[in-house]
Image (cartoon, grey):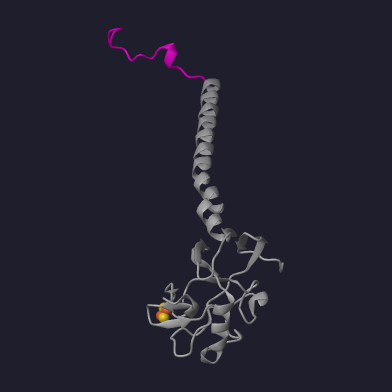
């Protein structure tokens, strides 16, 4: 065998025990770093998933509705917890009209309906000229519209449920209960906060 064909078994290829240990340590170090990065990358979406999203926070947070200049018969709408919220202006004529029809109502005193304790009264409100409600029919959840004559309240076109200007359902309607009233409070004369009240 010539020197040219000999296996290149030179001193370069001889790895001492010390060298082997150094290489092993280096390899373990690199693997640890890569593993750590992987865990961190994998954990990021998991940790993010534990935090409520911006949208979810917005969906659950109280909202403010401007009521400056609200007129009788005017309906202002917003969204709270993904549900329509109404703020409706009323005058004495409307309230008297509703009172005159009480015997036609299913639950005139709202004993079986859902509202905060401070709204379980004749007009179902904190201020008699302003009515606040969740704008969803208590039958199957359609959103009612206003009656042509504003003092007649609201009509659900889906199956014909009728509600007065205090959201009280008329007998004979498929809806079993009055419209739901959410917790709310007045932060000042021109603003209502929906989703929180002074009862806490
Ligand atoms: S959903 Fe309103 S009457 Fe049926």
Name the one closer to the observer, 184 or 74: 74
**Position above or below: 198 against 26:** below
**Which image quadrant for residue 62?**
bottom right
- Image position, residue 145 (x, y; %): 43, 73
Asked if residue 120 lies left or right of residue 88, the reply is: right
**Position above or below: 146 against 174:** above
> Is 18 inside the magenta-drawn segment?
no
**Position above or below: 198 against 35:** below
Name the one closer to the observer, 11 or 156: 156
Identify the residue at image location x=61%, y=77%: 124
Question: Quadrant where the C terminus lies?
Answer: bottom right
**Which image quadrant for residue 52?**
bottom right
* Quadrant of picture, ligand 1: bottom left
Name the one closer to the observer, 63 or 104: 104
- Image position, residue 89 (x, y; %): 55, 69
Residue 197 visible in the picture:
yes
What kind of secondary structure does the magenta stretch mostly adopt?
A: loop
Question: Quadrant where the N terminus lies?
Answer: top left
- Image position, residue 85 (x, y; %): 52, 66
Identify the residue at image location x=62%, y=59%: 190
Identify the residue at image location x=51%, y=81%: 164
Q: Which residues are magenta?
A: 1-16
Name the one closer to the observer, 79 or 56: 79
């Amino acid at each position: 065998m010539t020197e040219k064909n000999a296996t290149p078994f030179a001193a370069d290829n001889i790895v001492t025990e010390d060298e082997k240990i150094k290489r092993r340590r280096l390899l373990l170090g690199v693997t640890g770093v890569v593993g750590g990065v992987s865990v961190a990358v994998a954990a990021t979406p998991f940790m993010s998933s534990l935090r409520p999203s911006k949208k979810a926070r917005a969906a659950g947070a109280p909202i403010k509705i401007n009521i400056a200049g609200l007129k009788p018969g005017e309906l202002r709408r917003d969204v709270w917890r993904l549900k329509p919220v109404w703020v409706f202006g009323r005058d004495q004529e409307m309230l008297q009209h509703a009172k005159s029809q009480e015997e036609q109502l299913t639950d005139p005193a709202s004993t079986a309906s859902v509202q905060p304790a401070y709204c379980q009264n004749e007009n179902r409100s904190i201020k008699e000229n302003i009515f606040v409600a969740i704008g969803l029919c208590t039958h199957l959840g359609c959103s009612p519209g206003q009656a042509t004559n504003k003092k007649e309240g609201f009509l659900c076109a889906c199956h014909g449920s009728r509600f007065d200007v205090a959201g009280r359902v008329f007998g004979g309607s498929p809806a079993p209960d009055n419209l739901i009233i959410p917790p709310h409070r007045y932060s000042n004369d021109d603003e209502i906060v929906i989703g929180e009240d002074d009862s806490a």
